[in-house]
Image (spheres, rainbow, N blue to C red):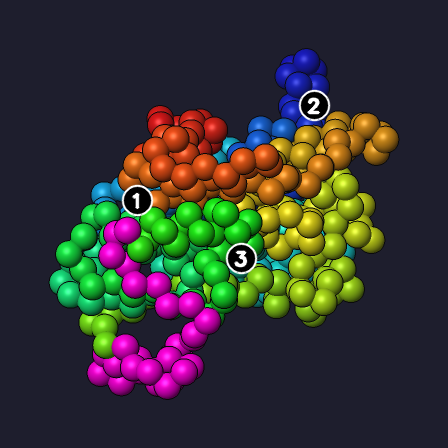
Amino acid sequence: MCLLNLGKGREMLAQEEEKRVVVVGGGVGGAFVAYSLQFVADVVLIDQKEYFEVSWAGLRSMVEPSFAERSVINHTDYLSNARIIASSATNITDKEVIVSDGSSVPYDYLVIATGHKESVPRSRTERLSQYQEVFEKIKSANSILIVGGGPTGVELAAEIAVDFPGKNLKLIHRGSRLMEFIGFKASQKALDWLTSKKVEVILQQSISMQSLSDGVYQTSSGETIAADCHFVCTGKPIGSSWLKQTILKNSLDIHGRLMVDEHMRVRGFKNVFAVGDITDVQEMKQGYLAERHAQVTSKNVKLLLMGGKESGMASYKPGSKIAIVSLGRKEGVAQLPFVTLSGRIPGLVKSGDLFVGKTRKQLGLVP
């Protein structure tokens, strides 16, 4: 009897001592942190939606809705030992996170991973239906306008051009060249590829969404463009506006990004970390780099959970300027440190499966 009570006592003590890690945001960075820590801490993931999405696969899902069956994953599928709160965080104190229904979630360690602000459906079923609706819109349209010539606009134009070669497709971009975030050579190769697929690329002009009238769009130069439908692929705002009234308000830079140290800790805090696009790390904002943020953060939180010394914490080294932009299903443009490639070789690296199988495997799922 005494032994049984002692065992129960130890079990209760272990439960009391288990530290809680709260992760806010269920994108790439947040999902990977929660997955990595779920068996070493009491993990709570707070996300406005019930699923994780391989974000860079979304454009393929617009032309092939069934692709989203593998790239849109319920949080419960890969988080078997964590609690999921499908709601938005609204405030942070030094001890807890407040969510939109007014309830609070205490934390010992906090990871902010709210990336960019976007409006998406709450459930996986609704998200899959949304992709089906977009596909039908593309399929039925004769002419399509894409607004924005960053990587999203270029990749969407490529997906449509390959899967629907008969469409009258236009891409308008306010910059002097496509994808200014990468080098001139890669930008030019992407332009040449789109032009070869009969995509009309209009540079140094923009569209005012207020000028929309019965499928006729007015450019900044006063010209009109007729299109059956359009897709806006311009930059999304950083998902940090909710932090401006929290204890982290003084850790935001002038661009709204959280300032972090080399250990991915928010500056000024010992137990708060940040990963992904919301950080001020000086590098291109890409999914695979958010994964690397998550790896360093998970390693450091584990160290602290086990009582390790801060001197043993891992450091993050900003990524080099490597970028792969897919051009349809088989081709792509790759900017590497010493060379820029286009065609089938970069396409083999990314364009086929878009790393969906790899990402699923990293989350313990069947590829």
Which comes sooner in the sequence, label 3 or label 2? Answer: 2
In the image, 98 versus 316, the foreground residue is 316
State if disc 1 and disc 3 touch (CB < 8 Å): no
Front position among marks 3 and 1? 3
Residue displayed at 47% across by 29% down = 362
**What is the secondary structure assignment of the residue under circle 1?**
loop
Give the residue type that dot 1 points to.
Answer: Gly
Residue displayed at 25% across by 57% down = 198
For label 3, the crowd category at 10 Å Cα-Cα, with few meaning under 14, some 14 to 19 and many 20 or more, is some
Residue 211 part of the magenta-drawn span: yes
Q: Which residue is mark 2?
A: 10
Q: Is residue 273 visible?
A: yes
**Labelled disc at residue 328:** 1
For label 2, the crowd category at 10 Å Cα-Cα, with few meaning under 14, some 14 to 19 and many 20 or more, is few
What is the span of residues highlighted in magenta in the rendered image? 196-225
Q: Which residue is mark 3?
A: 180
In the image, 167 versus 255, the foreground residue is 167
Which comes sooner in the sequence, label 2 or label 1? Answer: 2
Residue displayed at 43% across by 74% down = 205
Q: In the rendered view of the protein, which quadrant contains the N terminus?
A: top right
Residue 3 image offset from top left, x and y in percent: 68, 13
Is residue 158 placed above or below 92 in the rendered structure?
above
